[in-house]
Image (cartoon, helix red, strand yellow):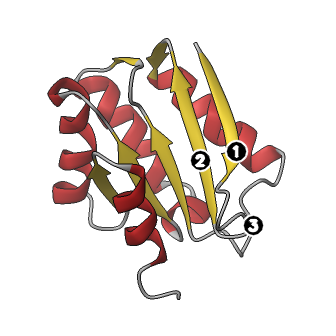
Amino acid sequence: MSIVYEKHNAYPESILIRNFIGKVSVKDIIDSWEYLHDNKLIDKKIKGVINNLSGCELIMDMEHFKTLIDYLKKQDYIKKIKLAVISDTPKTIIFPFLGEEKERELKIKPFSTMEAAVNWILMGFL
């Protein structure tokens, strides 16, 4: 598993992208958030993070999903930004869909394209 971090080409100050590659577990996702926080990659200018799960193998079930949501809800810096999740499989997209529907204190939304994710993050800011 690896996660490649990049700033969005057109909106480098506002959007951070995490591209997930290979097998990805909940521990990997939480470790990635810790890395972003510890290295101050999410500052006050960042409006959202695009989590690109296209092509990766997400190792998750409902118990792992609950662990991830519990972690995210404890992080004030995460609650202040939008979390777009790009997925290309029903097995993967179900989790951001559940996050959007059930976890109102987090701003999570599933997408199938980068363009749609970018537009949602920037909505209300441009």
Please name whichever residue, 100 or 65, is drawn nearer the observer in this view of the structure. 100
Q: Disc 2 designates what residue?
A: 17
Left/right of residue 97 with respect to residue 81 in the rendered view: left
| Residue at screen point 38% across, 46% down | 85
Q: Earlier in the sequence, mark 3 or mark 1?
A: 1
Q: CA distance from mark 2 to mark 1?
A: 5 Å
Disc 2 and disc 1 in contact, CB within 8 angstroms = yes
Q: Disc 3 designates what residue?
A: 43
Q: Earlier in the sequence, mark 2 or mark 1?
A: 1
Q: Which mark is residue 6?
A: 1
Nearer the observer, disc 2 or disc 3? 2
| Residue at screen point 33% across, 25% down | 64
Of helix, strand and loop, which one carries label 1? strand
| Residue at screen point 46% across, 63% down | 118
Q: Is residue 19 above or below residue 59?
A: below
Q: CA distance from mark 2 to mark 3?
A: 14 Å
Mark 3, Cα crowd under 10 Å, few <14 / some 14-19 / many 20+, is: few
